[in-house]
Amino acid sequence: MVIIGAGGLGLMALEVLRAMGGRGAIVVDIDPAKRAAALAAGALAAVDARAPDAAQQIVAATGGARAVLDLVGATSTVSLAIAASARGGHVVVCGLMGGDITLALPVIPMRPLTLQGSYVGTLQELGELVALARSRGMRPIPVTRRPLEEANAALDDLHHGRVVGRTVLIP
């Protein structure tokens, strides 16, 4: 499994994967601090998404990714997910950064490749996730608490990728 985006959602995805009995994941991010946090949280490896050979690194580590979870959803991350996918690979895009992709249509049937979008789950799925978290003792993601007066600084940190985990503003 490959997880693109090692922020709070990426760390949660690693924890859910572990709770479901998964062996681990390769995590991809542009931020060295987030890659380090993912490794500390149990990622098998971390790849710099901006490396010119990022797709080749993923293929070398996985033999070609069978499952990619893109928590960013940008042109560059979806393109990387497709380039790193194996024959029969499944790419799920959850992130909403935006952009567009140009895809040679023969890639889909010749590999064969599945490209799927997912934004929210059902109420039943949420219940299953909560039950999984309770039964498997999932570790919480890092949470930084800041006073409400620091809201602008917190948004600036988020915008510049300086947040690992989540930030909660306290009134």
Image (cartoon, helix red, strand yellow):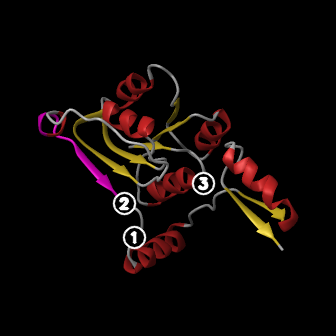
Is 156 located above or below residue 166 in the figure? above
Amino acid marked by disc 3 = Gly
Where's residue 26, x and y in %? 46, 38
Q: Would you say the residues marked 1 and 2 are in contact, meaning their CB atoms lie under 8 Å apart?
A: yes
Q: Which residue occupies the extreme top position in the image?
A: 52
Where disc 1 sits, the SS reads: loop
Q: Which disc number belongs to residue 8?
A: 3
Residue 106 drawn in magenta: no
Magenta-colored span: 109-118
Residue located at (46% from left, 52% from top): 95
Q: Which disc number belongs to residue 121?
A: 1
The reply, left or right, for residue 30 in relation to residue 117 is right
Residue located at (18% from left, 34% from top): 107
Amino acid marked by disc 1 = Gly
Q: Nearer the viewer, residue 62 or 153?
A: 153
Where disc 2 sits, the SS reads: loop
Dot 1 crowding, Cα within 10 Å, few <14, some 14–19, many 20+: few
- Quadrant for the C terminus, please: bottom right
Is 161 located above or below residue 13 in the figure? above
Q: Would you say the residues marked 2 and 3 are in contact, meaning their CB atoms lie under 8 Å apart?
A: no
Residue located at (17% from left, 39% from top): 108
Q: Earlier in the sequence, mark 1 or mark 3?
A: 3
Where's residue 106, x and y in %? 14, 33
Tell me the residue that label 2 is attached to.
118
Amino acid marked by disc 2 = Ser
